[in-house]
Image (spheres, coloured by chain):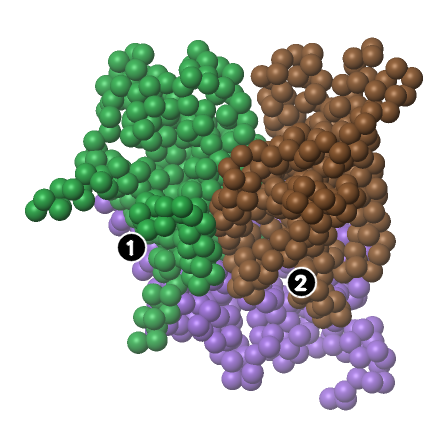
Chain colours: A green, B brown, C purple
Amino acid sequence: MLWLSDWWAAYQSTLAFSMVNAFFALSSYAVMATGILSFATVAFAAAGGFLGVQLLAVFGVPVWLALPAAALAGCVASVAVSLIFLRLESHWLALASLALILITRILVLNSPALTGGVNGLSVPVEAPLWLLALLLAGTALVFWRLSSSWYGIAACAVREDPAVASSLGIAPKRVQLVAFAISGGVGGLGGVLLAMVLQFISPETYYINIAFTMIAAVVLGGSYHWAGAIVGALVFTALPVLMQALVPAVQDVANGLALLVIMIVLPRGLVDPRAWRARQAAK
Amino acid sequence: MQLLLEQVVNGCAIGSLYGLFAIGFGLVFATLGILNAAHGTYASFAAIAGYYAATSAGLPFIASTSVGVAAGAALAVMVDQVAFQPLRHRKAGMIGALITSIAFWMILDRLAGLATGEQSLSFPAGTYPGGTWMVGSLPLPQMQVVAIVSLIVVAAGVHWLIAHSRLGAAMRAVGWNEAAAQIAGVNPRLVILATAALAGATSALAGVLAGISTNNVSASLGEGMLLKGFAAVVVGGYEDVRGAAIAGLGLGIAEVLSAQYISTSMRDAITYALLLGFLVLRPRGLFGRVSFVRA
Amino acid sequence: MLNLQGVGKSFGGVHAVSDLSFAIRRGSVAGLMGPNGAGKTTVINLITGLLPADRGVVTLDGASLAGLPPQDIAAHGIGRTYQNVRLFSGMTALEQVVAGCFLRRDTGLLASFLGTPAARRAASATRACAMALLDRVGMGHRAHVLAEALSYGEQRRIEIARALGSGPKLLLLDEPTAGMNASESEVIGRLLHELRDAGLTILMVEHNMRLVSDFCDHVAVMSFGRKLTEGTPAACMAHPSVQEAYFGSKDNAPRC
């Protein structure tokens, strides 16, 4: 049994990070499911992260209160942002959301009273694995429920063809606004959980790398089903760890190659409901 | 007044590099519909290739710059064929290509690190025009003049190419609707290759010149260019080359002046505040028009 | 019921539709005919709000639809199909129709968030309703098949079922039998008969003269964005300018 505990010790943090990344991936999946490519999750995560850590560290708020507060902060930020973003066309929205990440970092750097500026903030509370798992399961439950509700069908319709959706009475922008609100809530929660896993946050914590990680995770896992986001986050977090063990000198190159090959071989991702259905139909 | 003028010239020179890079980055976005995260690495590799051409092979400035530009163009074509071509017929859309470009970014960034031995190299004196001309009492470093002239020539050339040449018409056609362009007798594969090479070469030129004038030939060169070039494309609009060029210049000037007269720490804040302002007020960039949206 | 008054739309100088007026009575089947490029589909897009009209007003039961977004016009009771079938890819036939039933949802967002029993009951009621619509168009047995795996004629029927999902008062059909073989057209024809008998008001754009003369109470003919004439199908087809628009000149027209 000794090898098991060794293995556990070595990979515990990988598991924690993959669960945190799953929140980010679910957050970007929420908007992608309505046909929007947005990197804004990182900004929502920063809003939730810095607010949550302030509450925990400075005001001594208990965890069970700080977590919903962080989610709410992300949600408020996302609704505010989406009011501007939803006026943009898809390509511009993608660019604008990247710009938002850069702007967020500058804001964080220049308001040290709230964020600790360059020095960052240390986080007094650690997130136990069971808490991460519980919250992730709860979030997944909400996504599962939503996917079979009228909202899920409407989101899918808006993603496939917004003009047709609108002639069925579905207001595309309203559905996308809801998607942003969900994305913000989940992203804010992920932001504070990341802080609690890292035990330290700075302007660099919520930066471009998260954006690319989460989008890659969603696309890798499959952007047509919520489970894809979770699977993708797991694979995309475990992959670098694996590569580090196998080829430490060129692990980034190996990661990149793996991502490239998976994308070219499986462009719809690992979890693809259409493939299941096609198989079902063939039977 | 003297200081202000000097700083404006500085700003124009830096801005020219941003503009040059943004022309290439925007061209790929407008014509091929790809948000290319690997684009910055073309600039890094161009600077690295130029550096080795100047130091190891002892080539003069024009020749080593050409080597860098050729390397950038070749790299752009290679990345396009490996990372983007397989996705083109699958309706993977912008997201698929973005992911493969991120993959190449990771790979090339690391390889650039290996190529420079994880450090920042600088072109030795004598491998580039390092002198300074005086216009009255205003000093004009030759490299800055080279940068500004390059931007003007390249922007005018690319604008002419797109707006008035046959290749440009074909590029616009492919950017609009590849299938329709093919029916109209345009070979999309060839146009895509030409666009990728042109975009790679333009950004590579920015990379070599930036590598020389900032004394920083490394992987981080491309990353910086990518962020600023991206900002220039958002402000200037990607549908028009002139927009990216002017926005790049403007960003450079704003950056230098705000660092001089406000504070260094606010330099990036101002760039991105401009970015945000444009997004809200003029979401399609300087030369943007309301496009025809199909119902 | 539906009234168009002086409606016009131009695209960069090209007048796709100019000064078009016509009315549709409740419970009637109206036809809109004209050669390709006459602006028929543009008219449908103007009525459903996918395109904003430059001039003129569209009213439904006396209420102006001007400036309303498509989803609000749909909520007023107008459903439509498309000239090239536009189903959502990746959805099964049943899900398409469930999406069409969007306006019938009666649970709040929060309830579906939490998956309350009421929300689940509502969801299964919607599915039952969608299933009934599929049966109505004779596609119940294909409910769980991906739409893109269905034949063209079947896709058309799914699209009609989807449009019926919102419970429209007025159904706009854009070339319901375009590209179909005779037996497929026959099936659609029977379906339209049933819908008309059930009291639905229908406006259809159609080239199939037989279908038009079989079904339509009233026909308007367009050419180059203008209305040439309107009246009963037989009167319209006999009209000289209609024959000229379709066949070049009166002499080229087939004698019947």
| Residue in the picture at 79% in, 38% down | B151
Q: Residues within 10 Å of mark 2 (few under 14, many from 20)?
A: many
| Residue in the picture at 88% in, 21% down | B134
Kindly give the residue lying farthest to the right in the view shown.
B136
Does mark 1 fall on the same chain as mark 2? Answer: no
B218 vs C181, nearest the viewer: B218
Q: Chain of mark 2?
A: B
Residue C219, horizontal then vertical, whole percent: 68, 68
Secondary-structure class at tag 1 = helix
Q: Which residue is mark 1?
A: C124
Quadrant into which the C terminus of chain C falls: bottom right
Q: How many marks?
A: 2
A71 vs B261, nearest the viewer: B261
Q: Chain of mark 1?
A: C
Task: From this view, report whether residue A61 is shown above or below residue B251.
Answer: above
Q: Tell me the amino acid under the disc marked 1.
A: Ser
Q: CA distance from mark 2 to mark 1?
A: 43 Å
Name the front one of labels 2 and 1. 2
Q: Tell me the amino acid under the disc marked 2.
A: Glu
Task: From this view, report whether residue C179 is shown above or below residue C205.
Answer: below
Question: Residue B178, labelled with which disc?
Answer: 2
